[in-house]
Amino acid sequence: MRVVAISGSLRASSSTSAVLRLAKEVAPPNVEVTFYEGVGDLPHFTPDLDTDEPPAAVQTLRAALREADALLICTPEYAHGMPGSLKNMLDWVVSWPELVGKRIAALSASPSSDGGSYAHAWLVQTLEVMSTNVVATLIVPYVKNRLASNDETLRAELREVLYRLGSM
């Protein structure tokens, strides 16, 4: 199974990206996790550019998503929402028919005790209105501490998320 992992953070050392790297590390042998790292390269969404020949960065995004069996998206929380860059990426595929029914795991991660629950709710709601198939969710509170301590519970939770992505 081919899973494309997408971090909602553009920071090189982000905790959300670290969660996705850990997911790749704990993935079973039949799950190939690859990273789409072009979120920051996408132009601001406008329907005027969403033509039969969209910008090259959008074509790259859509090709990566088309080839994926499932998506693993992890968002941080900024001002009780997901980052604008992640929302912009979703706007580029909101009416794209190849995402309809696509299996997705929606994650949030935050150093706070609520784990980015507001951003998580917004992400799930956006994915559901796009007619994707959200099959797994995970909120990761105290993410920095949990990553630093090599938290076995977090590893098990990520394995479960990947299992749900693969369960047809």
Image (cartoon, rainbow, N blue to C red):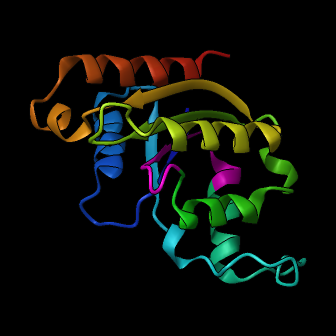
Q: How many marks?
A: 0
Residue placed at 55% from the left, 18% from the top? 164
Residue placed at 65% from the left, 36% from the top? 124
The one nearer the camera, 44 or 20, is: 44
Residue placed at 35% from the left, 38% from the top? 24
Residue placed at 66% from the left, 53% from the top? 65
The one nearer the camera, 167 or 89, is: 89
Expressed as whole percent of the image width and height from the top left, the position of residue 139 reads 43, 29
On the image, which quarter does residue 152 sit in? top left
Answer whether residue 74 is magenta in the image.
yes
Query: Split into 4 quadrants, where in the image is the N terminus?
Result: top right
In this orientation, does residue 70 appear?
Answer: no
Expressed as whole percent of the image width and height from the top left, the position of residue 86 reads 56, 60
Q: Which residues are magenta?
A: 65-80
Answer whether residue 87 is magenta in the image.
no
Expressed as whole percent of the image width and height from the top left, the position of residue 134 reads 67, 29
In this orientation, does residue 107 appear?
Answer: yes
Q: Residue furthest front?
A: 79
The one nearer the camera, 168 or 155, is: 155
Expressed as whole percent of the image width and height from the top left, the position of residue 8 reads 47, 56
Query: Split into 4 quadrants, where in the image is the C terminus?
Result: top right
Task: Examine the rendered structure and indicate whether residue 67 appears above or below residue 143.
Answer: below
On the image, which quarter does residue 28 sit in? top left
Task: Examine the rendered structure and indicate whether residue 2 appears above or below residue 163.
Answer: below
Whether residue 59 sits left or right of residue 139 in the image: it is right
Task: Examine the rendered structure and indicate whether residue 130 appears above or below residue 35.
Answer: above
Q: Residue furthest left?
A: 149
